[in-house]
Image (cartoon, helix red, strand yellow):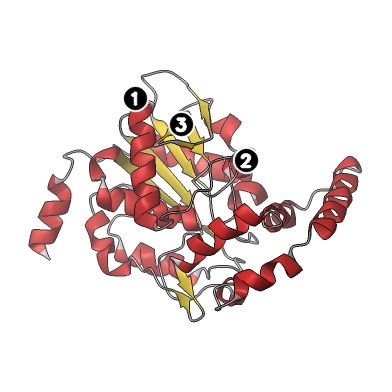
């Protein structure tokens, strides 16, 4: 669809007006395709919406604001245009930060919150991402993401797939890497990453406001082998959000939705089916603020 003059691509599986709607938000340099291993199974029980954020995937990559607040406002407008009311929001990595921002800015739109290897919960993050925020990094990136290397890697990946081998974690990382061979993707990537990370680590941190989610049904999912954002952030967030649920996946890295899709689907299904959506709009947040 066209939203504010920009093309926005999304995947939508509708299960009926009586079913909860899940909003799936991908991570940095990702797109809605990242959910391909969980979306069909989730669509058996729920309506599922998975957009490409602006600057990612097949959506437009305009000059402009790539902050968490801008992404959250864009999702609000997307839901309005699709005539979708409140949703259970599921965010991975950067998408987790966007999910928390959406719940903070527009609590009337969020029924439940699921954070998967989420950003925005502490300073620590992979040194590779920190390196990419250094001044001038955008001018060196074409040297590290040449189309010739990407084309060769895609051929290798196809050969591996044809032989029936599967390395989902590396496949997801390769797709993110390959997307940066295109100049417009790199420009959007740099704007996005610098809005949340600097050479010292993550610059956006929601931990001082997690108490506001006390009334929000919240599930935190993390791989104990996450090499991008440490699992310690999961434990700290669980401690900070009263009544939250925590699911640690043993032997799993940063991409539970591609490494452990069946397990993740079951965890999400059980969480949604055994919790009631947040009610009261802004009232629970006002109560939390007044009681702080």
Q: Position of residue 150 (x, y in %)?
A: 80, 56
Query: In this view of the protein, can residue 116 be seen by the observer?
Result: no
Tell me which residue sits at (38%, 68%) in the image. 204
Circle 3: is it few (<14), some (14-19), or many (20+) Cα within 10 Å?
few
Instruction: Kindly report the distance in space between the C-alpha atoms of the residues bearing marks 3 and 1.
Output: 15 Å
Tell me which residue sits at (67%, 57%) in the image. 180
Say which label, 3 or 1, has the lower sequence index.
3
Left or right relative to 209: residue 153: right
Say which label, 3 or 2, has the lower sequence index.
3
Residue 176, above or below 35: below
Task: Name the image quarter holding residue 77.
Answer: top left
Say which label, 1 or 2, has the lower sequence index.
2
Task: Name the image quarter holding residue 162.
Answer: top right
Left or right relative to 227: residue 168: right
Task: Give the labeled residue for mark 1.
Answer: 83
Tell me which residue sits at (58%, 65%) in the image. 224
Quadrant placement of the C terminus: bottom left
Disc 1 is placed on an element classified as: loop
Q: Nearer the viewer, mark 3 or mark 1?
A: 3
Q: Position of residue 288 (x, y in %)?
A: 14, 57
Q: Nearer the viewer, mark 3 or mark 2?
A: 3
Q: 282 or 63, which is in the foreground? A: 63
Left or right relative to 114: residue 281: left
Query: In this view of the protein, can residue 287 be seen by the observer?
Result: yes
Instruction: Kindly report the distance in space between the C-alpha atoms of the residues bearing marks 3 and 2.
Output: 20 Å
Residue 93, above or below 126: above
Residue 179, label in figure: none
Task: Give the labeled residue for mark 3.
Answer: 2
Residue 33, label in figure: 2
Disc 2 is placed on an element classified as: helix
């Amino acid at each position: 669809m066209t939203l504010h003059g920009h093309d926005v691509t999304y995947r939508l599986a509708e299960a009926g007006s009586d079913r909860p709607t899940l909003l799936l938000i991908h991570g940095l340099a990702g797109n809605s395709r990242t959910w391909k291993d969980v979306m069909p199974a989730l669509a058996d029980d729920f309506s599922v919406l998975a957009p490409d954020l602006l600057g990612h995937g097949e959506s437009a990559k305009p000059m402009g604001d790539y902050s968490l607040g801008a992404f959250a406002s864009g999702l609000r407008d997307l839901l309005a245009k699709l005539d979708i009311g409140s949703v259970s929001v599921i965010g991975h990595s950067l998408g987790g930060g966007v999910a928390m921002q959406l719940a903070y800015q527009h609590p009337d739109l969020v029924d439940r919150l699921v954070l998967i290897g989420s950003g925005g919960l502490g300073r620590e993050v992979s040194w590779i991402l920190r390196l990419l925020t250094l001044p001038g990094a955008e001018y060196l990136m074409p040297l590290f993401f040449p189309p010739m290397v990407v084309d060769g890697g895609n051929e290798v990946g196809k050969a591996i797939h044809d032989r029936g081998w599967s390395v989902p974690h590396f496949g997801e990382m390769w797709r993110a890497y390959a997307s940066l061979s295109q100049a417009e993707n790199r420009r959007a990537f740099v704007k996005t990453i610098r809005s949340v990370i600097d050479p010292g680590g993550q610059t956006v941190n929601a931990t001082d406001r997690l108490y506001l989610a006390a009334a929000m049904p919240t599930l935190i999912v993390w791989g104990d082998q996450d090499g991008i954002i440490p699992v310690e952030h999961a434990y700290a967030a669980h401690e900070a959000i009263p009544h939250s649920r925590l699911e640690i996946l043993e032997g799993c890295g940063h991409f539970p939705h591609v490494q452990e899709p069946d397990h993740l689907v079951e965890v999400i299904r059980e969480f949604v089916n055994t919790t009631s959506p947040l009610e009261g709009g802004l009232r629970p947040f006002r109560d939390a603020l007044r009681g702080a």
